[in-house]
Image (cartoon, rainbow, N blue to C red):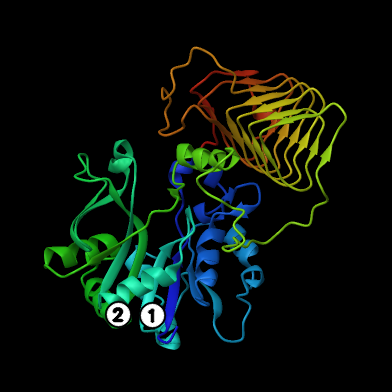
C-alpha cells in the first residue's frame, strides 16, 4: 500500500449476554470452530490484507486474550517494525481512566497514531466471525475521498432490531439508528470503520473535550446530523456477531453443515491461530461419530453426533453427545448424555449425568435472553454423577460437586455464583 494504513481492534468488551461463557474471559477470547479464538478472525483479516501495524485495545479480563496472542507470532506480527501492540488502560502522569467508550479507547492511545503516522485508520471489532479483504474497503474509501466509511451487511429482517441499522442512498449513509424497535431497513452496521487520520484525530479531540466517548453516537450519528457525508461499503460474505448464546451456538454449528456458508478450508484466506500441541484423534473400537468436527487430541470411545469437539476432549464408552459444543480438555464419563449444550473448558461430567434432554419446557421461558434452548456449563465445573440438567439452563464456572444441592435442575433454571451477572 503506497499510503499507510493502521488498524485498531476493539477487544475490551465483557460479553455480558454470553453469560457463563465470558465469566472468566473477554468475548474476543472465546473459543470458536474447534480450533480458533474469535479474535483470530480480525487479526487474520488484517495480516491477509497486508496490515501489519495493529493496536489491540483490551480491558475486560484480558489474561486469556494476552496469553493467546503473545507477541503475535502465529500471525507474523512479531516484527521489529510494526507488528501488534496490546493497548490496555494504564496510569499515566496525567489523570487517566478506564476506557469509557470506543472513542475514548482510541483517544487514550493517540500516541500510537502519532508514532505510526498513518494516512488512514481502520477500526474493527474483535468479537465477530467473518473474512474480509480490507484492501477492497480501503480502495472504496479512497475512491470516494471519504472522511469516514463504515462497512455494512444485510441481516435477517426479524433480527434487524438487534443491530445498528442504516439507510442508504447509493453509497451514502442517510440515516443510522442503533437497535431500532421498528427498523427501516435490514442493512446492519458491522462495527467496522475506516477514517482519514486527520478527521479522526480532530473529532476525537472535540468529543472527548465534551465528555463524549462513543464512535457511533458521537462521531457517526453526529456527523449525519451535521449533514456530513459518510459512505457505506457493502459486504456480502458470511458475518456473525457472536454476542449471544444463540448467535455463538449457531455460528459454530454452521460449520458442521455439509456446505457451510462460512468456509474455513479456503487456502487463499487462511485463518491463523495459536495452535495447541496435541496428538492425533483416537477413536475406540465401539465409538460412533456422525457428522461432527473433532479436533486434535480428542479420544472418542462413545457416540458423537452433529457436534463440535475442541482439542483434548475425552468421551467415555456408552456416553452420547448430540448437537453440542464441547471445549478443550473436558471429560465426559460413562453413560452420560449431553444434548443441545455448550460445555466450556476443563469440565468434568460424572457417570449417568443427563444434560439438555427434551421435555415440555417452552423455549425462552428463562431468566436469561437468547439462550435458544441451549444449556451452558461454565469453565472448570464438575457435575456429580447422576445429575439431570434440563434445557435453557445456566451452570456457572468453577462450580464444585459439593455445590450441587440437588440432583435435578429443571429446564429454565440455573446454578450461579452469588454475584450473578
Quadrant occupied by the N terminus: bottom left
Question: Which is nearer the eye, 181 or 44?
Answer: 44
Residue at position x 46%, y 30% from top?
372
Image quarter for residue 321? Answer: top right
Question: Residue 168's spot in the image, x, y percent?
Answer: 20, 57
Question: Which is nearer the eye, 322 or 86?
Answer: 322
- Name the side, left or right, on which 106 lies relative to 221: right
Question: Residue 126's spot in the image, x, y percent?
Answer: 47, 60
Residue at position x 43%, y 25% from top?
366
Question: Which is nearer the eye, 329 or 322?
Answer: 322
Residue at position x 28%, y 41% from top?
161
Please indicate, yes or no, whether residue 96 appears anywhere in the rendered image. Answer: no
The residue where tag 2 is placed is 201
Can you name the residue that lies furthest to the right here? 285
User: Are the two marked residues, 1 and 2, in contact with CB atoms closer than 8 angstroms?
Assistant: yes
Whichever of labels 1 and 2 marks the residue nearer the N terminus, that label is: 1
Please indicate, yes or no, whether residue 152 appears anywhere in the rendered image. Answer: yes
- Name the side, left or right, on which 141 lies relative to 18: left
Question: Residue 254's spot in the image, x, y percent?
Answer: 53, 40
Question: Which is nearer the eye, 397 or 182?
Answer: 182
Q: Which mark is residue 110?
A: 1
Vertical position of residue 367 compared to residue 25: above or below: above
The crowding category of the residue bearing disc 2, from other C-alpha atoms within 10 Å (few below 14, some 14 to 19, many at least 20), is some
Residue at position x 18%, y 69% from top?
229
The crowding category of the residue bearing disc 1, from other C-alpha atoms within 10 Å (few below 14, some 14 to 19, many at least 20), is some
- Name the side, left or right, on which 229 lies relative to 96: left
- Cα separation, mark 1 vs mark 2, equals 8 Å
Amino acid at each position: 500500500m503506497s499510503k499507510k494504513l493502521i488498524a485498531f481492534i476493539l477487544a475490551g468488551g465483557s460479553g455480558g449476554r454470553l453469560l457463563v461463557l465470558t465469566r472468566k474471559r473477554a468475548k474476543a477470547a472465546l473459543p470458536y470452530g474447534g480450533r480458533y479464538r474469535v479474535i483470530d478472525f480480525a487479526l487474520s483479516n488484517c495480516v491477509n490484507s497486508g496490515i501489519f501495524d495493529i493496536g489491540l485495545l483490551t480491558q475486560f479480563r484480558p489474561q486469556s486474550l494476552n496469553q493467546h496472542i503473545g507477541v503475535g507470532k502465529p500471525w507474523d506480527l512479531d516484527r521489529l517494525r510494526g507488528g501488534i501492540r496490546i493497548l490496555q488502560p494504564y496510569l499515566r502522569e496525567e489523570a487517566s481512566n478506564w476506557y469509557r467508550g470506543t472513542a475514548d479507547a482510541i483517544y487514550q492511545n493517540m500516541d500510537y497514531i502519532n508514532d505510526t503516522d498513518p494516512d488512514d485508520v481502520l477500526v474493527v471489532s474483535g468479537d465477530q466471525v467473518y473474512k474480509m479483504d480490507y484492501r477492497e474497503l480501503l480502495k472504496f474509501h479512497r475512491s470516494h475521498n471519504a472522511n469516514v466509511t463504515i462497512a455494512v451487511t444485510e441481516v435477517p429482517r426479524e433480527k434487524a432490531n438487534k443491530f445498528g441499522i442504516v439507510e442508504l442512498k447509493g453509497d451514502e449513509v442517510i440515516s443510522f439508528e442503533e437497535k431500532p424497535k421498528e427498523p427501516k431497513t435490514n442493512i446492519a452496521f458491522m462495527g467496522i470503520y475506516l477514517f482519514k487520520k486527520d478527521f479522526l484525530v480532530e473529532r476525537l479531540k472535540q468529543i472527548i473535550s465534551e465528555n463524549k466517548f462513543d464512535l457511533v453516537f458521537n462521531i457517526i450519528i453526529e456527523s449525519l446530523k451535521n449533514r456530513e457525508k459518510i459512505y457505506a461499503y457493502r459486504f456480502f460474505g458470511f458475518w456473525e456477531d457472536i454476542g449471544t448464546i444463540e448467535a455463538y451456538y449457531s455460528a459454530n454449528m454452521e460449520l458442521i453443515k455439509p456446505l457451510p456458508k462460512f468456509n474455513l478450508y479456503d487456502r487463499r484466506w487462511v485463518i491463523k491461530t495459536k495452535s495447541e500441541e496435541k496428538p492425533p484423534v483416537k477413536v475406540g473400537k465401539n465409538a460412533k461419530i456422525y457428522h461432527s468436527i473433532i479436533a486434535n487430541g480428542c479420544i472418542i470411545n462413545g457416540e458423537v453426533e452433529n457436534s463440535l469437539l475442541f482439542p483434548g476432549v475425552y468421551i467415555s464408552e456408552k456416553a452420547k453427545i448430540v448437537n453440542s459444543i464441547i471445549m478443550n480438555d473436558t471429560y465426559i464419563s460413562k453413560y452420560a448424555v449431553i444434548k443441545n449444550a455448550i460445555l466450556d473448558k476443563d469440565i468434568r461430567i460424572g457417570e449417568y449425568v443427563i444434560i439438555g434432554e427434551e421435555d415440555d419446557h417452552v423455549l425462552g421461558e428463562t431468566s436469561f435472553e437468547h439462550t435458544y434452548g441451549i444449556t451452558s456449563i461454565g469453565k472448570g465445573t464438575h457435575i456429580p454423577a447422576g445429575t439431570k440438567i434440563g434445557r435453557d439452563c445456566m451452570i456457572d464456572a468453577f462450580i464444585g460437586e459439593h455445590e450441587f444441592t440437588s440432583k435435578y435442575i429443571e429446564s429454565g433454571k440455573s446454578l450461579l455464583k452469588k454475584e450473578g451477572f
